[in-house]
Image: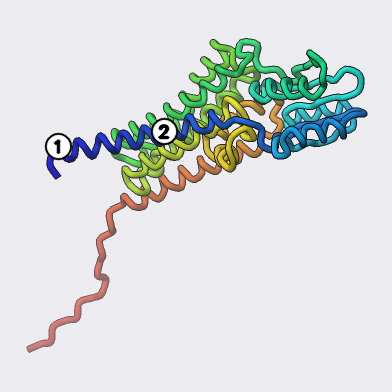
């Protein structure tokens, strides 16, 4: 293949990658709507409201009837539901912008249409950080965490020849990255409330997971592992992380798949720890730990593969020559 032919081929390949990235990032954003979104209803008109919601869109909501307003608030605080409609007198809409500002806005709008009143009362039970009321800062921090992890993994792979030394660099990056990133996010920008050290530990785990996936795959299968890790985490994991929306707002099954990848698990874990006292933190924490353990295992495979084959030693005693 001539130089000109290679140039054309690379240009076409780059255009194809661009098209795939546009689909991956724009398609989920253009198709956001409730898909079995869990919400609670309570009060004398709970059954009627449930019927109205089902008639509005049969697949939009997973409607759960609870005993009273207190139970509805508990369900929101425990991350069992995203919001609630309390009937009886003037309708009351309970939302949790910390769980998803997009869902909070949609629930308020839908409840207003159902109630027939111009402005139903809306209470934000678990509010987003006052310095980030629309959650835009929270959503924007997930991609840099992923990209910096990819960059760290690539640099460690290309510049550090020893696989055990890459593991040391990976651990150093995770500790320093977690502490520094949360000093910016939680300290300077004040986007996340809660314990700094706890949040830094989560950020460090995310950094280790993402960079470790790159380093581990590259160690186990070669440099093709860098591309595989980048595609999985950036091209699939980030647009389907639901960091700016909610998994139940994304096209199926991508909302669920996104929660099984590091960016989605990171967003859910940070939300649970920062705003909900750790409610529903077990699932995303388990996902990140599984990815971290897999990264360590891949590094181990790489170490085994890189060892030179031991020289075969013939231990048999020589047979003495016959006397002539």
Residue shown at 58% from the left, 43% from the top? 253
What residue did someone put label 1 on? 4
| Position in image of residue 131 (x %, y %) | 61, 10
138 or 30, which is in the foreground?
30
| Position in image of residue 159 (x %, y %) | 29, 33
Of mark 2 and mark 1, the one earlier in the sequence is 1
Question: Is 91 positioned to the left or the right of 5 in the image?
Answer: right
The quadrant in which the N terminus is found is top left
| Position in image of residue 322 (x %, y %) | 13, 87
Residue 132 appears in which quarter of the rendering? top right
Residue shown at 91% from the left, 19% from the top? 89
Question: Is 148 positioned to the left or the right of 29 in the image?
Answer: left
Q: CA distance from mark 2 to mark 1?
A: 26 Å
Looking at the image, is 248 positioned above or below residue 304? above
What residue did someone put label 2 on? 21
| Position in image of residue 288 (x %, y %) | 55, 38
Q: Can residue 287 be seen at all in this image of the molecule?
A: no
Q: Which mark is residue 313?
A: none
Q: Residue lying furthest bottom in this view?
A: 324
Looking at the image, is 216 positioned above or below residue 321? above
Residue 269 appears in which quarter of the rendering? top right
266 or 243, which is in the foreground?
243
Contact between marks 2 and 1 (CB within 8 A): the answer is no
Residue shown at 51% from the left, 15% from the top? 184
Secondary structure, mark 1, is helix
């Amino acid at each position: 293949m001539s130089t000109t032919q290679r140039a054309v081929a690379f240009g076409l390949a780059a255009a194809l990658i661009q098209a795939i990235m546009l689909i991956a990032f724009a398609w989920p954003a253009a198709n956001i709507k409730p898909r079995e979104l869990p919400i609670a209803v309570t009060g004398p008109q709970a059954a009627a409201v449930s019927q109205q919601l089902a008639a509005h869109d049969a697949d939009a909501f997973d409607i759960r009837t609870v005993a009273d307003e207190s139970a509805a608030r508990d369900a929101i605080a425990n991350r069992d539901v995203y919001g609630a409609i309390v009937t009886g007198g003037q309708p009351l809409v309970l939302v949790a912008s910390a769980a998803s500002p997009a869902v909070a806005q949609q629930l308020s709008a839908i409840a207003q249409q159902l109630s027939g009143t111009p402005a139903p009362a809306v209470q934000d039970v678990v509010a987003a950080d006052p310095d980030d009321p629309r959650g835009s800062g929270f959503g924007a921090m997930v991609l840099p965490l992923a990209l910096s992890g990819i960059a760290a993994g690539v640099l460690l792979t290309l510049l550090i020849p020893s696989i055990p030394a890459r593991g040391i660099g990976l651990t150093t990056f995770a500790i320093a990255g977690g502490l520094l990133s949360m000093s910016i996010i939680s300290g300077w920008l004040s986007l996340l409330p809660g314990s700094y050290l706890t949040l830094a530990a989560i950020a460090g785990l995310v950094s280790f997971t993402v960079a470790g996936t790159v380093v581990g795959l590259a160690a186990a299968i070669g440099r093709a592992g860098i591309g595989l890790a980048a595609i999985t985490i950036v091209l699939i994991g980030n647009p389907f992380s639901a960091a700016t929306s909610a998994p139940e707002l994304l096209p199926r099954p991508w909302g669920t798949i996104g929660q099984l990848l590091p960016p989605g698990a990171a967003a859910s874990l940070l939300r649970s720890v920062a705003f909900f006292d750790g409610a529903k933190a077990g699932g995303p924490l388990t996902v990140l730990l599984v990815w971290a353990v897999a990264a360590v295992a891949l590094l181990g495979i790489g170490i085994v593969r890189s060892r030179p084959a031991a020289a075969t030693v013939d231990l048999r005693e020589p047979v003495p020559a016959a006397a002539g």
